[in-house]
Image (tube, rainbow, N blue to C red):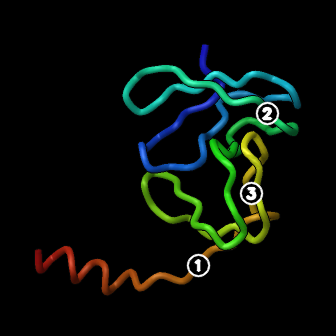
Amino acid sequence: MPKALHIHVTDNIAVCTSAVQPGDEVEILEPDGSRGAVKAVEAIAFCNKIALCDIASGEEVLKYGEVIGKATEDIRKGCLVNDRNIASQPRAYADEYLLRKEA
């Protein structure tokens, strides 16, 4: 049974569906229904995010195919991704809405 969900093909994180421990081989359900895996580097609680690849400091973190923040430090593949290593970025939501209405 998968221990994490990779929600959108462009995401660089997955959401853990159960707690994982360092060294666990975390089976991931991919967006196309296939299975992948990543080795957990640290303990990650249920519903928290695991890095699917190395994410450099300043790089965008993607969930649901959307930017949820930028890495504030280098994040290694298999590490916990949360508010200690990412920061939210301001967005012009009104502008995005208007652009979609005009299209």
Q: Which numbered disc, 1 or 3, marks the residue that appears first in the sequence?
A: 3
Give the structural element (helix, strand or loop) at label 1: loop
Give the structural element (helix, strand or loop) at label 3: loop
Where is residue 13? Give x, y as percent: 60, 47
Q: What residue do we see at 71% from left, 44% from top?
A: 48
Which of pointers 1 and 2 indicates the residue nearer the eye? Answer: 2
Query: How far apart in space, not on screen, are marks 1 and 3 (Cα)?
Result: 14 Å
- Kindly give the residue lying farthest to the top in the view shown: 1
Q: What residue do we see at 78% from left, 45% from top?
A: 79
Residue marked by disc 3:
82
Q: Which numbered disc, 3 or 2, marks the residue that appears first in the sequence?
A: 2
Residue marked by disc 1:
89
Q: Are marks 1 and 2 in contact (CB under 8 Å)?
A: no
Disc 3 residue type (three-letter): Asn
Residue marked by disc 2:
40
Q: Which numbered disc, 1 or 2, marks the residue that appears first in the sequence?
A: 2
Crowding at mark 1 (Cα within 10 Å: few <14, some 14-19, many 20+): few
Q: Which quadrant does the N terminus fall into?
A: top right
Disc 2 residue type (three-letter): Ala
Query: How far apart in space, not on screen, are marks 1 and 2 (Cα)?
Result: 27 Å
